[in-house]
């Protein structure tokens, strides 16, 4: 691969075109995602990866509300924190630039770049990095990944940062 756009095209799973579907809300359904990225329906954990990927492909976050949007329904669900967790990472070399690629708990890959930046926010009283995903969604960086990044991070007057796709992303 020669460019970041090519890398994104190869790695990133497309989201359903939910922005095109204009459906009236059906209200809150008995579905939730806990703070460990586990999905539940009517109190039972959803363990089939393909089912979770299907739901993730229609999940959106707007104005503080998580919704599953299909061509026929728009249903609100409860999410404890971020719907996804970053569990592992690797580095790709694209010419002279290095790109950090994260893998979430559903096995999807996301390069850290302007399109998918790292941000920080409070989680359980600590400042924690999150990866911004399409449709207003985020993935919290798991503690083990954070510690690995802390070992390879560079430092400047603002703090510890990662360099990915020629941009600096601060860890705290």
Image (spheres, grey):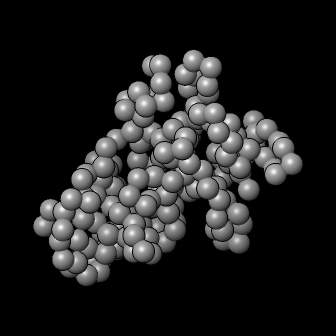
Is residue 38 in view?
no
Q: Residue at x 35, y 67 (%)?
A: 40
- Residue 103 appears at what percent x and percent y? 49, 41
Quadrant showing the N terminus: top left
- Residue closest to the far bottom: 27
Q: State whether residue 31 is above or below residue 116.
A: below
The residue closer to the viewer here, 55 or 14, is 14
Q: Tell me if 111 is positioned left or right of 149 in this view.
A: left
The residue closer to the viewer here, 43 or 93, is 93
- Residue 14 appears at what percent x and percent y? 31, 44
Q: Residue at x 47, y 24 (%)?
A: 3
Q: In which quadrant of the rendered view does residue 148 lie?
A: top right
- Residue closest to the far left: 72
Q: Residue at x 79, y 38 (%)?
A: 154
Q: State whether residue 151 is above or below residue 132.
A: above
Q: State whether residue 142 is above or below residue 163.
A: below
Q: State whether residue 37 is above or below residue 100.
A: below
The residue closer to the viewer here, 45 or 105, is 105
- Residue 72 appears at what percent x and percent y? 13, 67
Q: Residue at x 39, y 66 (%)?
A: 61
- Residue 87 appears at what percent x and percent y? 55, 46
Q: In which quadrant of the rendered view does residue 59 lie?
A: bottom left
Q: Tell me if 70 is positioned left or right of 88 in this view.
A: left
């Amino acid at each position: 691969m020669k460019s970041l756009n090519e890398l994104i095209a190869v790695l990133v799973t497309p989201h359903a075109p939910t922005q095109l579907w204009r459906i009236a809300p059906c209200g809150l359904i008995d579905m939730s995602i806990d703070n460990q990225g586990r999905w539940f329906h009517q109190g039972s954990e959803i363990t089939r990866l393909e089912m979770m990927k299907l739901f993730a492909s229609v999940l959106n976050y707007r104005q503080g509300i998580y919704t599953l949007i299909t061509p026929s329904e728009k249903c609100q669900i409860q999410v404890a924190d971020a719907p996804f967790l970053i569990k592992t990472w690797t580095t790709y070399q694209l010419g002279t630039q290095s790109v950090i690629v994260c893998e979430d708990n559903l096995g999807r890959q996301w390069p850290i770049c302007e399109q998918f930046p790292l941000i920080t926010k409070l989680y359980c009283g600590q400042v924690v990095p999150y990866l911004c995903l399409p449709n207003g969604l985020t993935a919290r960086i798991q503690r083990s990944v954070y510690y690995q990044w802390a070992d390879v991070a560079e430092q400047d007057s603002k703090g510890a940062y990662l360099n990915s796709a020629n941009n600096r992303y601060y860890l705290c």
